[in-house]
Image: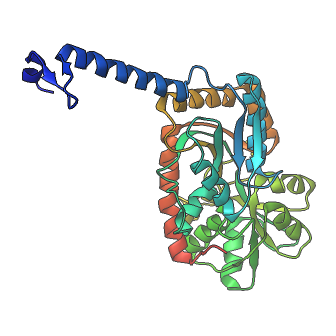
Amino acid sequence: MSLRLLASPAFHTRAGTRQTPRRVLASMAGTLGCLLLALAATAPRAQDYPVKPVRLIVTFTAGGAADLTGRIYAERLSEYWKQQVVVENRIGAGGAIGADMVFRAPPDGYTLLLATNSHVINHVLYDNLAYDFTRDFAPIALVTGAPMVLVAHPSFPSSDVRSLLALLRANPGKYNYTSCNIASAHHFAMEMFKTATHVNALNIAHRGCAPAVADTVAGHIPLAATSVPAALSFLQQGRLKAIALLSPERTPSAPTIPTMRESGIPELAGYGTDNYYGFMAPPGTPAALRDRLEADVLHIAALPEVRARVQAAGLDPLAIRSGPMMQMIRADATKYKAVALASGIKPE
């Protein structure tokens, strides 16, 4: 509406009712006010959140690193918010089913995703996902890491990275390894190792870290790429031995295990990949609510008793804000895509 129109004395509606600009503006203001009130009534208000139970969707089975993270944080967030946070295990398709459920949920903060880099792997491997994991979800924070380790049966003739490489190069195709699943972070970590060092070993995948470790403890498979929590008790009992961490840094849960980088082998100087867990919300979650969720989750992450529980479970405590979280996810997507192309990794 131009200044000239606003200055005109009057005009007529289609019905012929005479209206002055002042009356029209008053009517428009009233309508706009009603609309804003309606939106305010339906939009989630960060300062009041939460007023009902919150669902935390964990896309893997009970007892694993994702589930342990989810339950530790659900318990403490329930206390902090004075509202129950309910963990729901929605498994299938490497986590894609549960992630899709959160993607389609209302953006009101009452359905959250326990995100992992397995979801990044799905983004790389599947062309038919309804969402882009590197763009569509609202990041909140990364809170734990599950360090990965290459372990061997005690009878295996190698105990460190240098002797392992010498053994694999002298016996191409003779030795196999197991991982926690096809196209898992552990599988990708070993394929990165093989590509960097030009060795050959076939992946005999299991459905989960626990059965992969059990087969290695039993001596059915000589090597396993697994999470530290799944192998830690067997390492402490001497029923497995650690070759090296696949993660880029040592872990407080097993501080004596060196990383691949520490082997001094030039091809492995930049080697390492993280296995991490954090929170995401559905796309369209309001910025104020995202900020509230991030602040509350990071508050829980800083509690000494939470850090102690995380470490006791064999996990590394993290407190990574939403911005750096998305930088890590996008960098991993690029890295995993290159590994998938080089090694031919495909989903089951």
Q: Position of residue 190 (x, y in %)?
A: 65, 68
Give the image location of residue 234, x and y in percent. 89, 57
Above or below for 341 versus 282: below
Report the residue at 56% width, 68% height from top: 126
The image position of residue 104, as x and y in percent, is: 58, 50
> Taking the image as drawn, is residue 320 in sight?
yes
Which residue appears at 68% of the width and 84% of the height? 170
Image: 13 above or below 177:
above
Closer to us: 207 or 245:
207
Can you see residue 256?
no
Q: Is 230 on the left or on the right of 28, as rendered?
A: right
Q: Quadrant of residue 140?
A: top right
Please tell me which residue is depicted at 63% across the width and 48% down the height of the picture: 115
Which quarter of the rendering shows the C terminus?
A: bottom right
Residue situated in front as seen by the camera: 292 or 205: 292
Residue at 53% x, 24% y: name it. Answer: 41
